[in-house]
Image: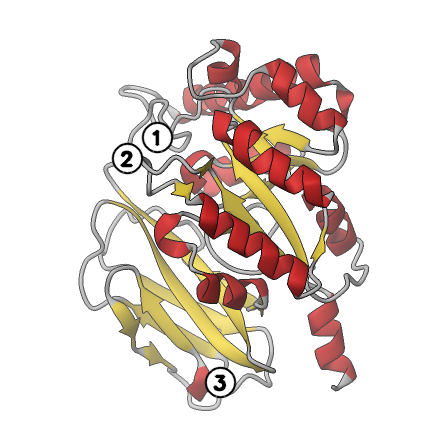
């Protein structure tokens, strides 16, 4: 193993994201318990290091090496099944995890969500809680007649309200560095990402990929886990994955305001990557052509053959990294119309 390859392996981590556990009536956001158990066994049997997300990010920001096979586990929304099913399983293994909580449903005592008392118990046993907004709305959506200043103030107050409620109920630990935020629905645009950054947060998305020291802290990737995407073979491949660093991605903003299907252009950070081995895929359309405008260059472009449907979609690009591993990059697309209010 070359020193460059060793550094690449050590300087990365994989973050998995969950919502519900064993709530089979919600297959798009829930993982079956047998799937979750199999994933935990895999991580244990293959000697993965399960670190708190905040510790992972601190190491990467300081450019300190991480042990190979470092994984962080995260959960969004604070549903009741986190306390009932995920928490006892992870507590029994002594494994930390991070819950990104939307605070309004907890404050209202809505059925299906955890209580503050349950969250305090979990925190006392090593679970970290972080900001997922107060209302879990589509934060990038503008209300009718709302100008940029009014939108910015509304989004800012929603995020800060959640932070205030978390700190009031769980103490100053939730305000320690790095301050963490997860975009509701994984949705962001340039304006929201810059707002979140200005508030001092490192932000998590829902696009796939591993994270490294050069991954954009405005929207760090996580691998979403739900019933349809939780098979053990796929999980294992994602757990082994490495960052696919790109110097430049155009457009960075995922909201498709014009041409659909949207074109994407990117520049490889590593000049040693074989262009012929880069493969890209579009949501629901399979593998798509990767074009290289300048033979021997590092810039490539991708565009899906057909328009993307309204909602959220992705272009995923991978390249073999040796030893059965892949570098993985995912670009989110958001195709209007999108909502503005709270949701699941």
Element type at mark 2:
loop
Instruction: Please indicate whether residue 201 sits to the left or right of residue 158 in the image.
Output: right
Residue 330, how many percent across, how many down? 45, 60
Q: Are marks 2 and 1 in contact (CB under 8 Å)?
A: yes
Residue 198 quadrant: top right
Sequence-earlier tag: 2 or 1: 1
Give the residue drawn at x 59%, y 29%.
Answer: 131
The residue pinned by badge 1 equals 141
Mark 3 to mark 1 CA distance (whole Å): 38 Å
Crowding at dot 2, Cα within 10 Å, few <14 / some 14-19 / many 20+, comes out as some
Q: Residue at x 39, y 82 (%)?
A: 292
Q: Secondary structure at mark 3?
A: loop
Q: Which quarter of the rendered picture does the N terminus lie within?
A: bottom right
* Apparent side of residue 155 relative to residue 255 in the rendered image (left or right): right
- Give the number of the disc on residue 338: 2
Residue 143 coordinates in the image, percent (x, y): 31, 22
Residue that mark 3 sits on: 297
Whole-number angstrom distance, CA of label 2 to CA of label 1? 7 Å
Quadrant assignment for the C terminus: top left
């Amino acid at each position: 193993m070359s020193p460059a390859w060793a550094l690449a392996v050590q300087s990365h981590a994989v973050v998995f994201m969950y919502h519900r556990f064993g709530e089979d009536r919600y297959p798009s956001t829930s993982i079956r318990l047998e799937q979750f158990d199999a994933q935990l066994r895999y991580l244990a049997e293959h000697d993965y290091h399960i670190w708190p997300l905040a510790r992972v990010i601190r190491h990467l920001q300081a450019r300190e090496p991480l042990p190979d096979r470092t994984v962080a586990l995260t959960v969004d929304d604070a549903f009741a099944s986190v306390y009932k099913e995920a928490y006892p399983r992870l507590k029994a293994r002594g494994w930390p995890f991070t819950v990104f909580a939307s605070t309004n449903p907890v404050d209202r005592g809505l059925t299906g969500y955890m209580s503050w008392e349950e969250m305090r118990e979990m925190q006392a046993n090593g679970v970290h809680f972080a900001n997922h907004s107060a209302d879990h709305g589509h934060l990038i959506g503008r209300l009718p007649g709302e100008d940029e200043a009014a939108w910015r103030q509304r989004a800012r107050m929603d995020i800060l309200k959640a932070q205030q409620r978390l700190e009031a109920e769980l103490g100053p630990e939730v305000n320690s560095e790095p301050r963490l935020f997860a975009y509701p629905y994984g949705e962001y645009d340039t304006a929201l990402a810059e707002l979140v950054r200005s508030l001092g947060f490192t932000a998590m998305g829902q696009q796939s990929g591993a994270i490294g020291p050069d991954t954009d802290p405005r929207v760090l990737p996580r691998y979403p886990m739900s019933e349809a995407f939780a098979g053990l073979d796929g999980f294992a491949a994602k757990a082994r994955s490495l960052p696919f660093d790109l110097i430049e991605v155009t457009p960075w903003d995922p909201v498709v305001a014009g041409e659909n299907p949207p074109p994407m252009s990117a520049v490889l950070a590593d000049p040693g990557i074989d262009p012929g081995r880069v493969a890209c895929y579009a949501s629901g359309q399979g593998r798509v052509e990767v074009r290289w405008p300048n033979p021997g260059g590092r810039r490539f472009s991708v565009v899906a053959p057909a328009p993307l449907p309204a909602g959220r979609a992705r272009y995923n690009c991978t390249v073999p990294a040796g030893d059965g591993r892949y570098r993985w990059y995912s670009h989110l697309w958001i195709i209007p119309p999108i909502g503005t209010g709270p949701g699941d």
